[in-house]
Structure formats: C-alpha cells, structure tokens
Image (spheres, helix red, strand yellow):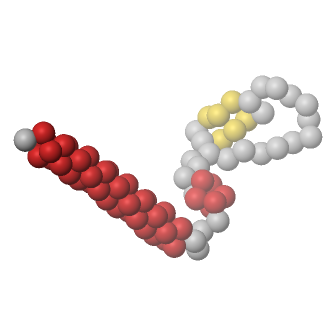
Amino acid sequence: MLERVKEYVIQKKRSKRFIFGFILVMLTIVTGLSYAVFMISTGKFRSSELFVAKLLYGISVTEAIDTDATVTNNVVVV
C-alpha cells in the first residue's frame, strides 16, 4: 500500500512539472511570436515617426534665453 502511495505522489509531481514546463514553453512561443509580429508591422516606421505623428502642437526653438513659454490654441509662445 505504501508503495502505491509513493508511486502516486511521484506521478503527480511529474505531471505538475510537465504542466509547468508546457505552460512555460507555450508562453515563450506566444511572446516570441507577438514580438516578431510587432517588429514586422512597425519595421517600416522609424521610432521618431511613431511619436511625432501624434503631436497636436508645435515647438519653436530660439536662441534667446527665456524660461517662460505658453501654449495657446496649439501654438507655443515664448
């Protein structure tokens, strides 16, 4: 009877390890494929274009040393 209990416990440990390993492998595959699709779909864009395309205001830089700037109607006034 004790031998059967030991075998049952060993079998359960093996199945838990298998399930954990299977989940880990599947998660790795899904993450890798998601990253690959992201890289392929955004490969034709430069990172600066991805951010600048969403800007709704403009910034002009002058040589004057001034610390005050205001944004009014999507225009920056220094």
Is 11 situated left or right of 69 in this image?
left
- Residue 16 position, x and y percent, is 26, 48
Residue at (43, 67) in percent of width and height: 33
Can residue 23 be seen here? The reply is no
Please say if 32 is above or below 20. below
Q: Residue at (12%, 39%) from the top-left corner?
A: 2
Q: Quick check: 19 left or right of 68?
A: left
Q: Quadrant of the C terminus?
A: top right
Question: Which quadrant: the N terminus?
Answer: top left
Q: Position of residue 63 (x, y in %)?
A: 92, 40
Query: Foreground residue, 7 or 27?
Result: 7
The residue closer to the viewer here, 15 or 59, is 15
3 to 52, vertically: above or below: above
Image: 57 above or below 25: above
Residue 58 visible, this orientation: yes
How many labels sit on residues? 0
Residue 65 falls in image quadrant: top right
Residue located farthest toward the top when viewing the structure as drawn: 68
* Residue nearest the viewer, comparing 76 with 34: 34
What's the residue at 23%, 47% (across, down)?
A: 10
Front one among 24 and 32: 24
On the image, which quarter does residue 44 sit in? bottom right
- 10 with respect to 44 (left or right): left
Residue 3 horizontal/vertical position (percent): 15, 45
Residue that appears at 62% across and 34% down: 72
